[in-house]
Image (cartoon, rainbow, N blue to C red):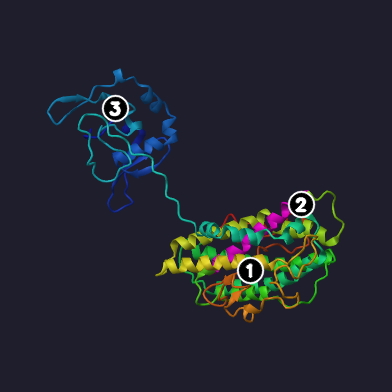
Amino acid sequence: MGRHANPDIRRAFVEFQDTDTPSKCNKVRCLHCGFVRAKNTTRQIEHLQDCQQYLASADAQAHLQQPLSQQPPQHQQSQDGTQVDTTVTQAGGVLSGQHPNPNLQVNRRGPNTKRARDGHPIAPHPHIQPSISPSLTAHLLSISASQFTQATQQPFLSHAGCGSLAPGPLSQWLVQDGHYQRGYIRFVGQLLSKIRLPQTQNSQFHHMYRTMDLLISALNNMRREMQFFEITATKYRLTLAQEPPTPITRALLDLFVSASSSSASMLEGMVVLWGTEHCYRSAWSYASSFSNSLSTPSTDSHIVALHQALIPNWTSPAFNKFVDANRALVDELANITTTRDGKEEMTRCEEIFRQICWLEERFWPDVDGMGEEDDSARLPPGMNAIGTGMDTLNGGMGGGSMNNGQMSASLNGSMSQHMATGQMNGGDTTPVVNNRNSFAMPNGDGLEGVTQDS
């Protein structure tokens, strides 16, 4: 028997020679769980410490309960030449990771240079918590917490949830959101054109293939949502005027162009996609929190549309999974980015998210305390409701400051991206109250959290 062989290891493993490899190395198989690895006493001990089948076996229980008096005395020679009784170090044997060599330190790579000099066992390593990858999305939400709250908790949303919103502001928002949807289609298409797919055997696990799958899903979902808007407007007899994009909507559309330009990275474009979707989900969840304040169901068609179709559309489990998958992908792309100046890209992402919050806040129509349209809500003193105070947009996206300099923004430059859409829902004719949303991802795309039955 070899110098490190012991009956505990011999009983738990069977040794065999691997003839399929050129080296024909000796391997062992755990008789309890079938685990196979190269023969190595230290690693075999480590395996038995974690093997639940072994720990539940009679051998392990008997070894743990064996009194110290029944264990054979073992000695080692100290530095002064005297014999030191190390029986106490053998308690627990294999399970403690100290048998057969009392100086064997488990979970340690390389030579053991810190051996005990007094015969006492070496203290085990403290448990090390697994490292957690940094999260770009959590960082962005942290530095813009107040701006994000302002963007997702507007009076328009609270009145929508309470059932006190007038039909005019809702129609205005639906028209502008239609402009946004069509710009969203072009934006996602441009992001898809920037993807370079490597040749790989496991494409469902590669981040670029999963990014492609999510963007394809976003396109399909937005097309269904456009149909959903048409069906909802017809079903609930909502009046939608033929109005051009407002200055804020134009800024959003130009933001899409900037986010998908050749000068913007894929990470910046995905931050825009996630940021706008996350804003929509949070905003409509805020509106949904007021639904309980409805004492009696409203008979107004636009209020019924809100509570039976529109609010459920952006608070559904399917949409939540889509936004969560988007967030996870942004964090992954941020952690594997190989740009030469990561700090500069981080700064651009921070700037982008602040612009998203600024634009989202102003995308919701202004309403007064009664839920009626209020054109003068954000106008500086001395300006009427017709001259909307948005002249500083410089043609919608000229790069100047917006609204008295609150947003330093070259909106067609270095990634001032926005995507007000949290809108990735179905447009079929099934009842909206029965989770009509369909945020389907192709099967086997590696984004299980996104996959929904179409």
Give the residues drawn in magenta, as a range.
269-292
Closer to the observer: label 3 or label 2? Answer: 2
Q: Nearer the viewer, residue 164 or 424?
A: 164
Residue 284 lies in the magenta-colored region: yes
Checking the image for residue 90, the label placed there is 3
Pick out the residue farthest to the top.
69
Of mark 3 and mark 2, the one earlier in the sequence is 3
Which quadrant holds residue 1?
top left
At label 1, counting other C-alpha atoms closer than 10 Å, the crowd grade (few under 14, some 14-19, many 20 or more) is: many
Q: Dot 2 lies on which element?
A: helix
Which quadrant holds residue 114?
top left
Q: Dot 3 lies on which element?
A: helix
Checking the image for residue 291, the label placed there is 2
Give above or below for 179 relative to 217. Answer: below
Q: Residue at x 51, y 74 (%)?
A: 264
**Relative image position of residue 329 (x, y in whole percent):** 53, 60
Q: Nearer the viewer, residue 53 or 338?
A: 338
**Relative image position of residue 227 (x, y in whole percent):** 74, 68
* Helix, strand or loop: magenta stretch: helix
Give above or below for 147 relative to 69. Answer: below
The number of numbered badges drawn on the structure is 3
Q: Residue at x 70, y 66 (%)?
A: 364
